[in-house]
Image (cartoon, helix red, strand yellow):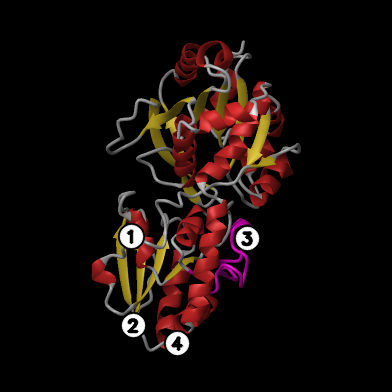
Amino acid sequence: MVHFQAVLGAGVMKIGIVSQSYYPRPGGVTEVVHYTAKILGERGHDVKIITTRFTGREPDDPRVIRIGRNILVPMNGALVNMTIGIGLREKLKRIFEREAFDIVHAHCPLVPTLPLLTFKTTPPDQKLVGTFHAAAETNLPYRLFNRPLSRRIERLHCRMAVSEAARAFIGKYFPGSYEIVPNGVDCGRFHPGVEPIERFKDGALNVVFVGRMDRRKGVPYLLAALPLLQKRISRRVRLILVGERGTRSLLMPRPVDLRGAELVFVGRVSPEALPRYYATADVFCSPAIGQESFGIVLLEAMASGKPVVASDIRGYRTVVAPGENGILVPPRRPEEIARAIAALAEDSDLAASLGARARQTALRYDWPNVVDALEAIYYRVAGVEVPDASAHALRAHR
């Protein structure tokens, strides 16, 4: 049954995206789902996002179908989303039957509950693909439930991973062929021309971190680096922490003596305000200790034309080439973080050069380029050849 040829016209597909992470919940998967759905829709495809309900104001979006309710569960050094509710399986099954998707795309497909339920509820005539986002050293559930999960994963018509780190992690437990489709960045939203935040334009060195206060993000090491950095340079240092605040930020260990440096906890900011925080940075720093498969915040900073200091972990090496478009330092080493930031503070030419090359790297990950690769996989899985003329005509809808 080929819906897009008979109903919507040649080259146009009906696509269902299943994700437990979506607005108003921030995060990398949320951004991936939002931008892929947006650009696919601009190209003429009929896209629906199947997700859950969250605490807080949810955007009114006719593309979004919500079932169940979200809870946060500790996993992989972070708090991850999980959907709970009565009759989730039957509700999901009815959605797939009603919408009659050509392609169902599950993000984090082996994670309970919505993604994992997708294997049991997607009708046989709807093609199922999945993207694996996580990277870690080990995963106990994957080891304990390897046999039943292996049967599930065989249902996928295409397995995708966002990076080599993610592919190596999932491939260790479930060998097979995985295609790399990276995360992306909106280079029109994040760019060097964004106006910095006025109150921080006072001559201080602004070091910016964006992300959750999860253990794996390494914020305590950045806090420990702050007085070391202030000791190294004469310019006053300000560390601006942007992201979820909550109890985790209150429990974060802080240095007793900041040596005159300033620490600013901003908390979560709106999507509209976020680019201005990147624009405010003299240096962007992400000191994650591991288990990062990619690093969307790195791309956002790089698209903003900012020099980046990040931990030398496999996921971050996906986008940062040391000495070319950023600086990588060993994880859990405050003194190395301070040394790298100080080098950029004292060498404006180096900072400007790394920032310019970072922007050029980010342009390769601009969302339309990423969606080109994803769209090609959808067409292949659906068994449809789209002539070049049709593809160009489809993109004319953007």
For this rendering, which residue is in front, 114 or 158? 158
Q: Position of residue 97 (x, y in %)?
A: 51, 12
Label 1 vs 3, first from the N-terminus: 1
Q: Nearer the viewer, mark 1 or mark 4?
A: 1
- Is residue 251 visible to us here? no
- Whichever of labels 2 and 1 marks the residue nearer the N terminus, that label is 2
Q: What is the x, y in percent for residue 133?
A: 58, 44
In 3D space, how far apart are the residues under numbered discs 1 and 4 (Cα atoms)? 27 Å
Name the residue tied to disc 2.
236
Q: Could you tell whether 16 is left or right of 143 in the image?
A: left
Q: Is residue 330 magenta?
A: yes
Is residue 298 one of those drawn in magenta? Answer: no
The label nearer to you, 3 versus 4, is: 3
Above or below: residue 394 compared with residue 122: below
At 50% from the left edge and 25% from the top edge, which residue is drawn? 16
**Visible residue check, residue 304:** yes
Residue 368 drawn at (x, y percent): 52, 42
- If the image is split into quadrants, where does the C terminus sit? top left
- Kind of element beneath mark 4: helix
What's the residue type where badge 1 is placed?
Arg
In the rendered image, which residue does mark 4 sit on? 232
Q: Residue at x 31, y 37 (%)?
A: 55
x and y percentages locating residue 376 in the rendered image: 63, 33
Front of the two marks 1 and 3 = 1
> Which of these two is toward me, 236 or 141?
236
Amino acid identity at mark 3: Arg
Magenta span covers which residues? 307-334
* Mark 3, residue position: 317
Looking at the image, is mark 2 or mark 1 nearer the viewer?
Answer: 1
Q: CA distance from mark 2 to mark 1?
A: 21 Å
The image quarter containing residue 129 is top right
* Gap between marks 3 and 2 measured at Cα: 30 Å
